[in-house]
Amino acid sequence: MRFSIVSLLLPQAAAFAPAATRNAAGSSLRSTKSDEFVVAVLGDLHIDPRKMEDYGSGRSHFLPIFDEAKSDGKGVAVVSLGDLGESKNCDHNPESDSELFAGTTQCHEMAAEFLSSFNDVPYDVVGGNHDLEGLDEFETDKENLEMYLKTHKKETPQFCREVADKTLLVGMGSTLFRDAVYTSHEVTIDQAQIDWFENLVQTHPAEEGWKIFVFTHAPPNGSGLRVLQENHVVNGCCWLNHSNEKQCKKFIELVREHRCIKAWFSGHFHLGQDYQDSITFPTIDPKDGPYPNRGSCVFAQTSVMRAGTSRDGRQQSRLIRGNKDGFEICTVDHQKDGKVRLDASITFKGDTNEVGVYAHEDEAYEHDKYFKVYQPCAGDKLHPPDDGFKRYNADGNINPFDIEMDTVAWWYLSCGRVLGMLNGNLIEYDSSTLAPLGLVVGADELVGKKIGVINSGLDADTCSMLFDEEEGMEGADCAALAGDLREQAVVLLDSSGLVTVVQPNEDGSYWRKIVRNKMVRMKEVRRVKAAKMWAAELMELEDENDANVVSSWGPYMTTSGTAKKTAVPGLTAPSAL
């Protein structure tokens, strides 16, 4: 059967009436005179048509807030941070027991009906990493995106709404899934939106009184928000445009340059709002640590509404209450009958600065420390680097040191890259923000070994001696190859004396872009399944799972300039160790 929001919600939610006004144009501005506003920020909805009760109660928690705000003449709006549907089969399509609900037409129609039902309060939405996942219904991202935009009455993936006098709500959405270069769950803002956003902040400067509140599914690199190592860090999908180094840095660069950007709200992590680092401020008291370099922008993580979609059990949304003097960030707790809790108060200090104050201590439980990801601190003129910082010795090396699960260490490479240890893993961090980028060497390979950094720069004579007989390197300009004499090698040493060199990627980065596009992985799984069925039939096996099938991947296995072998040591050929 086809599900409808009206038929599924509990009676207290009543039938949803569509909103009277919508912001259809991606860059239009709605005129308003009041400087006061109230905005509901909804995190990852992940609507499951079989489990609608929490959406009805969540909506009921906001209605009296909006009714009061409208009666006072305040600007009002609802903003959804995307990931509108559950990425599972939800018994929604009688013709398929495997189709995912997320990204389908039915999913977006239900989401639009729900978001339009807040008693004539207009809504805007940004695309998340699951919103173009209608793989069975649409062949391409373009077709899926067109349906998404049409259903939500959007002309573009981005939006801009003037919710109060010179106060803009601005959002940008992900536009890739099938065509993602790496993991399909990276939130990718296309270049056209980035250009649009840059022009918007340039033409609405803080000096003229403009205040911009930004909404994206994932946060930008440099936000300082709590992230998940076991999911988003190792898979390379923490930050906006995570795998594109230039674009990934662009957002925080714009925040630092344009002080009209006052706040940035995101979801994606499915974490609650009880941690203090679910909100980060642009400035802090020097006695508490180094200057965070986040412009004039507060960053805020947003939780989820429905039970079963949270990683830490919370069911919470954000509420913004603001005026010309500043704004408050609150939690609407859906597990406590919609209780509103003040989390932070932000006061504008002129047009280009703001000061934030937390309203309560960290309310997270002890087990929630699991979600905390260590981030290096480089210090500043008033503060030294943290205790994990590794310094080079007189020879320009970092002496090998033991790696255990609780080892905390980090260091700069001469090329500017930053590496460090986290829960037994070698992680690369962004050189500017020191935010985690991705996994370099896993704990399974590293714990129990030593790691160090040595010089590997070569002068011309040494280079010639080493490479004259190296196949594929004849006649190479070795002096040029030697380059900076501070060229370095990251090395691992095990108890048997085996040394492993951790080679960087071709672009100079170290973190491994291991997870590929979901479409590619689905095809790989089908190939393996077909091979198992073929092998079982050929060898007359009762169970296809008894077939011994492995896969081989490229592209690089050797330093040789001539490809002679394709075997994978230890997998398709004897181990080299």
Image: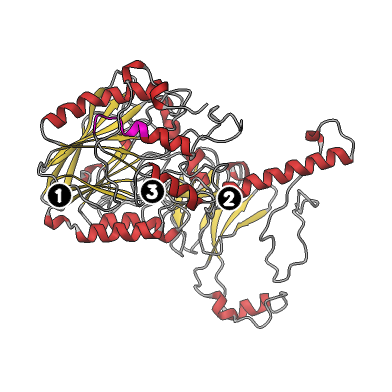
Image quarter for residue 124?
A: top left
Q: Earlier in the sequence, mark 1 or mark 3?
A: 1
Q: Quote the CA–CA distance across marks 1 and 3.
A: 23 Å
Place of residue 64 in the rendered image (x, y in percent of width and height, measured from the top left): 21, 24
Is residue 115 shown in magenta? yes
Q: Secondary structure at mark 2?
A: loop
Q: Are marks 2 and 3 in contact (CB under 8 Å)?
A: no
> What is the C-alpha distance between the residues marked 1 and 2?
42 Å
Residue picked out by circle 3: 173
The kind of residue on which mark 2 rests is Arg
- Residues 311 and 467: in front is 311
Q: Is residue 295 left or right of residue 236?
A: left
x, y percent for residue 152? 36, 42
Depth check: 541 or 447 in front? 541
Identify which amino acid the numbered label 3 is placed on: Gly
Name the residue rendered at 53%, 55% in the picture.
181
Q: Position of residue 535 (x, y in %)?
A: 84, 41
What residue span does the magenta drawing correspond to?
Answer: 113-120
Task: Please rate how many residues cluster around mark 2, counting C-alpha atoms within 10 Å: few if below 14, some from 14 to 19, many from 20.
Answer: some
Does 465 sit left or right of 7 as displayed? Answer: right
First reached walking from the N terminus: tag 1 or tag 2: 1
45 falls in the magenta region:
no
Looking at the magenta stretch, what is its main secondary structure? loop
Q: Is residue 168 visible?
A: yes
Q: Which mark is residue 516?
A: 2
Indicate how the structure is coloured in the image: secondary structure
Expressed as whole percent of the image width and height from the top left, the position of residue 481 reads: 57, 76
Q: Nearer the viewer, residue 291 or 410?
A: 291
Q: Residue at coordinates 37% horizontally, 17% vertically from top-left?
A: 10
Which label number is shown at residue 166? Answer: 1
